[in-house]
Each structure stands twice: as structure tokens, then as C-alpha cells.
Image: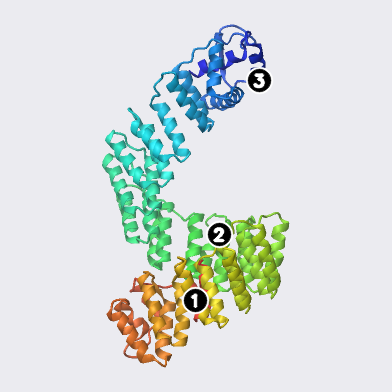
Amino acid sequence: MLWRSKCLLVRLSYQSTKTQFLSSIHSLYPPIDYPVNIHQSSSSTEHFCKAPATYRIILTPQGAFAHMVNVVSRLTQRFRTLKGLLDELENVGSVIKAGDLLLFLRIYWFGGMHSMVFMTFEEMLRYGYTPNTFARNILMDVLFKIGRVGIALQVLKETQVPNFLTFSTAVYHLCKLKDLVNLQGVLRSMLRKGYYLKPETFSFVLSCYCKLGQLAEATQLLGLMIVLGIPTSVRVWSILIDGYSKSGRLDIADYLLAKMIAGGCTPNIVACTSLIKGYLESQMTSKAFEILAAMESKGCYPDLVMCNVLIDCLSKIGSYDDAIDVFCSLTERGLTPDSYTLSSIMSTICLSKEFILLPILISGLDITADLVVCNSFLSYFCKAGYPAGAVEFYNDIIDRGFQPDKYTFTGLLSGLCRLGKTSQAVNVYWGIVKSQHGLDAHIHTVIINELIKCGEFHQAIRLFRKAVAEKFQLDVVSYTVALDGLLKGGLVGDAYILFNEMKEIGLAPNIHTYNLMLSRACKDGDVRMIKKILLEINDRGLRFNHITFRLMKKLLHKSHHSSLVFNLFMELWDSGLLPRNIQRLVFDKANCYLNVKDAHIDNPLLVLDTDTDTSSSEDIPDVAVSVG
């Protein structure tokens, strides 16, 4: 078929009875240097163009279609429509058969010419041919690609003899579109027709379910694979373990790992990375290292991704020395740090405030500077108390030809503010806003926060209100920082107004926002507001953290209205709004004191943010910015 259509095109080019047509084709269709085998019926190839029928041409499909897409595209442009091209072929004596139209369909599809695919399909019907399953599969694929999902599914439904490719194409596109409702229907139809997904497609579908949080359906799909006798690979198990780990259901992830091993499938380090990360983030370090030790005992050692995860997670739970040890072990493991490794270790250094260690740790490393690394250095200079270095380094970044992103800009703004050049920082900020389109909330939040740190409360609030008026993109972190500026600037009433406004526009406060407002209510001894905030926290299903309980403890111990506060807490506990098993976090009958940090082990409602531990509510905005 491919040979016949090539001959049709050659005949178009060399019909002596069509002089004008011939000249146009010569200009569009130059001689071809075929990367193919040509079996000749005579001793010379120079007569090929004169008598193409005497040759049998064997073309590799990819090479043939790559060339024919170009040829057919230019011919179609010359004759404006496919119908015009087909009419001209008929004028030179060619008979248009179903196979010719199908090949045109394949060429247009291969070349991504979607409108021509539809035109070819119509021509098939006009010639009286019934498109076969392959043609309908192409039509359905193109419909999915242009977003006409409903019509594509209708084509699938009306295909009388769907094959494996029909269902596989639909499944692929529905997974990409995250359309689980229609995906389930297609999978059921596929199974009823007796077709089973290949292991690779199963993995793709599993990944789709897990990414969308449909873990129960993903587990059912795994069970179906086992029942059907489809081999379950390490990749399949890894997808499920990753899904449950990221959702915080570590017990099920651990169970799946055990089932994986029991089924004779040996886990690799990729399968365990997300589970180990989950345990570390839950501060269950012993369990995480138990899994890691078991893997190493079987000769499965951490790769660079795992080491990056270890450095990041260990630093966030305050195990800075362990994180540094992992970084130092990279050379022994034969691993070369990448940009994310360097960014993670710089974050560790900044959190530990052991800034002097960085030059020692990176000494002798062959560092490939990309923008991620450069942004980390900017942050390091600012946090290490060397803002002049941040500004100077920013200029070096630009001189080296890097295209700055939002983190680069925020590093510059932070450096200028910390140098006391707030006016210049604000001017630079407005220059960035005018020159960069689509800025997200981060850069607005950082400049406001830095101005507040410099004591420029009123300037920070003016900038925030300007951002609101200009409808810049702002998020809950931006509003939390603005609330801090209002409170520190003595505009308590305005802070409560803004607090209500953010809720009215549908921007739900997070626990850091509530802690900020709770801190002020505690300072004012406003029992009514304290109760209102605690009720809102409970109604929103947020988890109390140690800052919340520290504020409540201070209020109880220092308040002039201690009896009112005590009664408030008892009322909340009695009503079930506060769980009784955390009562001891705020006070006990003996001495009204308990170490709050010990509570997270027994109480699932209390989230301990050791990476954001603060001694007072003054640091809450910084916590919010770092989290945001």
C-alpha cells in the first residue's frame, strides 16, 4: 500500500499531458535520495522517474512517513483541499481506492494535521467506503487530542469491532485528562470484550489513580492484575507504595512493601524512597532507618535521589548532624552532588545556623552552577547575615547570562532590604512587577515581609493594599504577613478587619494565620475572640501545633482573667471541640506545666513543626513565609 501511494505521487509529478501541473509538482517535489533498498527489474536506476512501475520500493515506515508528510502537506496546500488533490489524481488516471484514503489518513495523522484527518474521514464516506477500526482509532485519537472528549467517546461507542488499540488509546488519553469517571467505564467495556491492559498500561493507570488520591481504586486494580495473572512489576508496587506514603497512610504502604517481598518481587531503592521519606516526615526515624538498613543488607544502597531526600527530611526534623553526615558520605558512595543536593545542604546549614560549615563542605566539589544552586546561594548569603554578598552575587548571576526567576528576584529584594536600602528595594520590586508577567504571590509576600522586618510597617501595608487594588496574585501567606505588619504597626482594628476580609473573599486562614491572631487575642486577654478563633480552628479541621498550645499555656498562666480562661478551656474540652487527651499540654492539676514537644507522639491531632520551632509568636510570619 505504501509503495502504491508513493507511485501515485510520482505519477502526479511526471504526467506529460499535464504541463502546468507537472511544473508545479517539480517545484514541490524534488528528487528523493531514498535511504531504502531498491530492487530493480533492469540494470539502471536512472529511469526510475520515467517508469516507476518497474521498481519495487521497500521503505522503512518511519522514514517513509516522515518524507511523505512533507510531500502530501505541500501538495494539499497547492490544491487547497484533499478533494482537490484527489480530483487531480483522478484526472491523471488514478483510481482512488480505500487503501489510498487510509494511507492519506495515516500521513495526516502522523504529521499532526488534525483538520486534514477529519477531511480525509469525510472523503472516505463520500467515496462510499466504510472506515474500518484502524481509521476510527485515528479519528478518536485526534478528537481526544483537541479536547473533544465526548465525541471521541461516541466514536469509541459506535465502533462495531473495537480492538485492543481502540481501548488502549482511550485509556491513555483519559488518564492524561484525569477523567476517572469515563476511564472506569472504558476499562469495564474493555474487560467485557476480553481485552486486558499490558503491564505498562496498567502502571500508567495505577499512577493516574494514585496521583488523584483514588488509592482504593488503585488497590482494586492491583487485585485485578493479580487475578488476571498479569505480572506485577517493581514499578507497579512502587506506584502504590508511593501513593499511600504521600497520603500519610504509612501502615498500608508498609504492608504493601511486605506483600511485595512475600510475592517474590525484590524491592529496589526507588520503591522504598517515598516510604522512608514518609516515616522521616512523621518523625518515625527509627522505622525509616530500619527499612534503609534492611535494603543495604541486601546490597541495595541509596542513590542520589534517596540521599537528597535524607538530607532534606533530616534537616527539617532538626537532625542537622545526620543530614550533614549523609552529604559527607556521598563521595564514599560514588555519588556526585547535583543542584538539589547542594540546595538541600545549604538549607540544612541555614536551619542549623552553622553558616561557617558551608565553605568546608563544598570545598573541592566540582559544582555545576545552575539557577537552582545560584538561588540557594542568594538565600544563604541573606540568612548568613551577608546581604551585600547576596546583591553582589545577583549581579554575577545576571552577568553570567542566567535568566532570573522569582526566587532570584526575592533573593535580591531580601538583600537590599537587609542592607537598609528599602526604598531601592521597593523601586526594584515595582520594576520587576512591570517587566514580569504572571508573577505569583511569593515575590509580593517576600517584599512585604522584609519591609516589616526592617520596621517599615506602614510602607509594607501601603504596598500590600496597592497589590490588592491592582489585583495581584496573593495567597494566605501574603495575608498572614500583612496581618503581622498591621499588628506590629499598632493597627489592631485594621488587622481584625483584614482577617475577616480574607475569609469573605474565600481565602481560608491556615494554622499560622490563626496563631498570629490568637497571639494578639491572648495578649489583649480577649476571651471572646480566643474562643471564636479556637472554634474556627476546630471547624476547619486544622491540627493544633505546639505554637497554639504555647500561646494557650501562657494565657492561662499569666492572664488576669485566668478563671475565665480556665472555664473556657474546660467548656471546649467538655463539648468535644478540644480532645481531652491533649488537656495536659496546656496545664495539669499539679504544676500546670508539661513539655509540649513530648505530646506529638501520643496525640495524632497535634503536629509538631520542629523545623519551624519558635520561642514566641513574633516569628509566626517568618514561619508562614517559609512554609508558603
Q: In this view, does 256 lie above or below 33?
A: below
How far apart are the two marked residues, 3 and 1, measured between alpha carbons? 74 Å
Decide: few, some or many residues near mark 1? Use Cα within 10 Å; few <14, some 14-19, many ≥20. Answer: few
Decide: few, some or many residues near mark 2? Use Cα within 10 Å; few <14, some 14-19, many ≥20. Answer: many
Nearer to us: label 2 or label 1: 1
- Name the residue: 44% across, 78% down: 547
Question: In terms of sequence position, does the residue under pointer 2 or pointer 1 come before the other?
Answer: 2
Please, what is the three-letter code of the amino acid marked with disc 1? Ile
Q: Is residue 624 left or right of residue 174?
A: right
- Name the residue: 40% across, 81% down: 530
Percent from the top left, x then y, of residue 348? 54, 68
Q: Name the residue under label 3.
A: 30
Percent from the top left, x then y, of residue 439? 59, 59
How far apart are the two marked residues, 2 and 1, measured between alpha carbons? 44 Å
Q: In terms of depth relative to the viewer, which is nearer, 119 or 322?
A: 119
Please, what is the three-letter code of the amino acid marked with disc 3? Pro
Q: How many labels does the image show?
A: 3
Q: Residue 341 carries which label?
A: 2
Nearer to us: label 3 or label 1: 1
Q: In terms of depth relative to the viewer, which is nearer, 358 or 119?
A: 119
Q: In this view, does 158 lie above or below 183?
A: above
Question: In terms of sequence position, does the residue under pointer 2 or pointer 3 come before the other?
Answer: 3
Q: Name the residue under label 1.
A: 497
| Residue 509 visible to the viewer | no
